[in-house]
Image: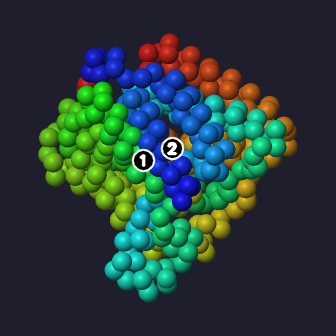
Amino acid sequence: MINLFYGLMAGILFGFILQRAHVIRYDKQLGALLLKDMTIIKFMFTAILVGMVGIYLLGDLSLLDVYGRPLIIGGVILGGSLFGIGWSMLGYCPGTSWGALGEGRLDALIGILGMFTGAALYAEAYPFFENNVLTWGKYGNITISDALGINHWFIIIAIIILVLILFRWLEKSNL
Amino acid sequence: MHSEKKKAWNPYISGALSGLLIIFSVVLSGNYFGSSTAFVQLVGILEKLISPERVSQIKYFSIAEPILSWQILFVIGILIGSFLAAKIFGEFKWQLIPSLWRTNLGSSKLKRGLVAFIGGSIAMFGVRLAGGCPSGQMSSSILLSISGFLAMTIFFIVGILVARLVFSGGVKG
């Protein structure tokens, strides 16, 4: 029960921030895909950098158990490509569509209904994918530091440097 | 357009706040952000009302159990939080056709509605296969998972290519 309350609270705060940053808007999402406005890239990568440092710091202090997510290359490539197609048509992703509806965007509501349909279809199709695409390139919970066999802080620092270079370039190019 | 830009919070500060929020969520309740499982669970809850026997036969609903979960409350929270922010800052507006769409692709409600519905279906089918939507892949990337970075890269590359087709007449505005 308390878990559900935390979910609601996290959602309300996240929804508030998403709306204030205007990143839930169709114009911003398509702006990124059309390479005209990189607001959502700045938002997402900053969240990743801060989250990464915090989570791994807590992990190193033994306050959290930190491990990677499972990798199935077949699923990520086929599913990721399908998402790319659908995302550029809808202009909202699953999380942001709820926020867009919150600020009155009715096309996001239509998108949510479409997403329910897609979820129902996937539940039907799962047994088929389970035996082929979802067995291609299955690696278990693997992180970049596991794959390279080096300490996670080297990876984190490298990612921070690369992202800061990207941000500098975006700001210089007025994106 | 420009006045709208002035009113928005800085994306770096907003992103950093969201990163902190994820850390707090993980520490308090062990939950990383993610949204797409909620869609499967909500559909499962709906199908259970119609035919509980059928739901018990669908294997995927044993993986994403159709029960009220952290993630369902999370997406409902996003709706409420965004609504509150939009109302407080005077930005709430009913709108079916986004301005970038209207400028470039016209004002047909049917066309926007159909593309949004079909796009939503394909997008959700895809993220379930890929193991998570952008918010889930953001969490996966925070954990330095290869799957998170690979998924985000593919989302963007394919999204950029298809957006060019959707806006094949050039982009104005």
Kind of residue at badge 2: Ala
Give me the residue at 85% from left, 43% from top.
A149
Above/below status of A124 relative to B54:
above
In this rendering, would B71 be left or right of B81?
right
x, y (%) of residue B39? 43, 60
Residue at the far bottom in the pictured view: B53
Q: Is residue B162 visible?
A: no
- In the picture of the structure, the residue carrying the numbered disc 1 is B77
Q: What chain does mark 2 sit on?
A: A
Name the residue nearer the viewer: B130 or A35. Answer: B130
Disc 2 residue crowd, few under 14, some 14–19, many 20+, Cα 10 Å: many
The answer to which quarter of the image holds residue A159 is top right
> Do the numbered discs 2 and 1 sit on residues whose CB atoms are within 8 Å?
yes
The tag on residue B38 is none
Quadrant of the frame with the N terminus of chain B:
top left
Name the residue nearer the viewer: A22 or B49. Answer: B49
In this rendering, would B88 be left or right of A67?
left
Name the residue nearer the viewer: A76 or B143. Answer: B143
x, y (%) of residue B56? 49, 82
Quadrant of the frame with the C terminus of chain B:
top left
Q: Is residue B111 visible?
A: yes
Give me the residue at 41% from left, 71% from top.
B45
Above/below status of B115 relative to A20:
below
Between the residue at mark 2 and the residue at mark 1, the CA separation in whole angstroms equals: 7 Å
Give me the residue at 49% from left, 79% from top.
B58
- In the picture of the structure, the residue carrying the numbered disc 2 is A10
Residue at the far front in the pictured view: A2
Above/below status of A132 relative to A14:
below
Name the residue nearer the viewer: A173 or A40. Answer: A40
Give the number of marks: 2
x, y (%) of residue B33? 55, 47
Please check whether the numbered discs 2 and 1 fall on a single chain. no
